[in-house]
Amino acid sequence: DVVVCRLSHRPGRDDRMTTHVGLTARALGADRVVLPDNATGSAETVRDITDRFGGPFEVELSGETKALVRGWDGTVAHLTMYGLPVQDVETELREAVASEPLLVVVGGEKVPFEVYDRADYNVAVTNQPHSEIAGLAVFLDRVFDGAELEQPWANADRVVVPKETGKKVVEPDE
Ligand code: SAM
């Protein structure tokens, strides 16, 4: 199991970022996203996309994201520009995922020290400041080694047919 946890959310300001953390987690192979409980709109959007484009993917709201990290029974990877380069830890992370649940933590506003401390891996996607969405995407692609790009989707109402030009969306099995 790979679960993504968005540590904090500022309503209004972070709405699109938090939604996109959820959508990116879903599209790039995670099993579940946990969002702070003040991000109800983002949770609704990600659930709605899952209903239409398929799953399996779970969206959960939590009043205690820090407690989730603290008590996680498995491996914790915290994405931070101050961490170890993802290319140096990806092999170990792949081995860890094969045997126990992985919690991938992304920050928002300031991340408390206890998260750095609890993390089994503080992982940097470059040591440059950028975005939790970009960091998450590269991280998941490294952990899944590209296999997430070919994942099947179940219970979709609609399926996009890849086209060189234009847009084609059909009902499944068409
Ligand atoms: N200012 C915040 C702090 O000091 O903790 C971080 C803000 S940053 C826009 C939000 C999140 O993006 C971070 O918590 C981290 O998860 C992610 N992030 C940004 N740059 C990253 C990088 N180079 N590698 C991995 N994650 C990164």
Image: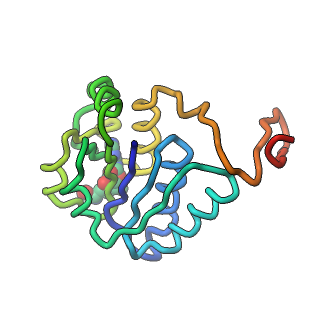
Q: What residue is drawn where x is 42% and y is 30%?
A: 142
Among the 4 quarters of the image, the one containing residue 96: top left
**In this rendering, position of residue 110 left or right of residue 165:** left
Residue 129 in view: no
Residue 98 in view: yes
Q: Nearer the viewer, residue 132 or 93?
A: 93
- Can you give x and y, in whole percent of width and height, for residue 15 in the image? 49, 69
How many marks overall? Answer: 0
**In this rendering, position of residue 44 left or right of residue 78:** right
Q: Nearer the viewer, residue 142 or 52?
A: 52
Whether 117 is drawn above or below 127: the answer is below
**In this rendering, position of residue 165 left or right of residue 155:** right
Q: What residue is drawn where x is 20% and y is 56%?
A: 71
Among the 4 quarters of the image, the one containing residue 33: bottom left
Q: Nearer the viewer, residue 84 or 114?
A: 114
- Can you give x and y, in whole percent of width and height, for residue 102 in the image? 32, 42
Among the 4 quarters of the image, the one containing residue 36: bottom left
Whether 95 is drawn above or below 42: the answer is above
**In this rendering, position of residue 19 left or right of residue 166:** left
- Can you give x and y, in whole percent of width and height, for residue 100 in the image? 30, 37
Coloration mode: rainbow
Quarter containing the C terminus: top right
Quarter containing the N terminus: top left
